[in-house]
Image (tube, rainbow, N blue to C red):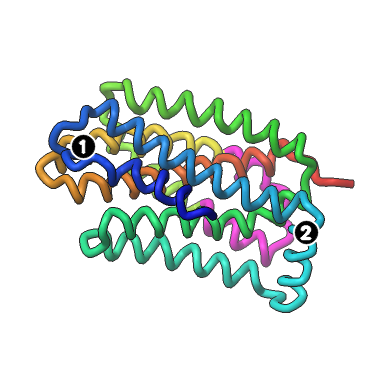
Amino acid sequence: MPENSYHDQNSLFLDDAQAGESMSLGRYTAKTFALMFLGLLVTFAVAFFLGNTVQGRILVIRALMAMPYLHLIILVAELAVVIGMSAMLRKLSPAAATVCFFTYAVLTGLTFSLIFIAYDLSTLTLIFGFTALYFGGMAVFGYLTRIDLSRLRPILLGGLIVLIVMNVLMLFIPGLAAMDRVLCTVGVVIFLGFTAYDTQKIKSYYYSLQGDGAMLKKAGVISALELYLDFINLFLYLLRIFGRSRD
């Protein structure tokens, strides 16, 4: 990616010397969502190039032939980035946190290239539109509601754990495949809930960290990553429900 592109992305949280002190809640929230959408743009741009161009597909095929477990390596790298960001949040600079975020977006784009190969672009575009619609509605709800959504956190985390366990079991117990549509529907509900919860959490960061501009900027990056993950997972579950692979 061009250097000036990274500069523009980083400036979302790095160009305001008084961020966290004079920035309004609306502006802080807007910057968080802008960073999140830039991350999605990077992911889908990488996936589109690798999955829908001749040069990209050749690169993917050669990489898989050279390293059959490449997708697992990428998944481990993605997990390492997220864990590293969470564990070292206080030590990372806002710039480093932003770089980690876009590194994760690029890695996700590499794994998504296989999806772009497997599905028609029209199908992916339609599912993306549905995802954006549902995500946007729940984000608006989370921002405007006066209901304390933090009470949903244990329920959402419990549902997420069940989803992970069931998806792993489906790999080893073929009979559970019949439950895939039900699990995907549950996944959609859970990540819609996470979208509202994570949007409301932006307000909590804003009010609790106003005295610490650097931490507030880093919290914005973490919030962008959380919303990015909500969108990606919502997209994947909707794709499993409604998507049709290439013949």
The numbered mark at residue 55 is 2
Image height of 190 relative to 25, above or below? below
Task: Judge left or right: residue 32 versus residue 175.
Answer: left
State the predominant SS element of the stretch in magenta: helix
Which residue shows up at 48% across the image and 34% down it?
192
Q: Quadrant of residue 170?
A: bottom right
Instruction: Give the Cα distance between marks 2 and 1.
Output: 44 Å
Amino acid at pointer 2 = Gln
Where residue 139 appears, x then y in whole percent?
41, 29
Which residue shows up at 35% across the image and 30% down it?
30
Which residue shows up at 62% across the image and 59% down it?
110
User: Is residue 203 among the parts visible in the rendering?
Assistant: yes
Image height of 95 relative to 70, above or below? above
- Element type at marker 2? helix
Which residue shows up at 55% across the image and 26% down it?
133
Q: Label 2 crowding class (10 Å Cα cut-off): few <14, some 14-19, many 20+?
A: few
Task: Judge left or right: residue 166 versus residue 245.
Answer: left
Where residue 206 appears, x then y in whole percent?
21, 37
Q: Which region shows up in magenta?
A: 163-185
- Element type at marker 1? helix
Q: Which residue is mark 1?
A: 206
User: Is residue 226 among the parts visible in the rendering?
Assistant: no
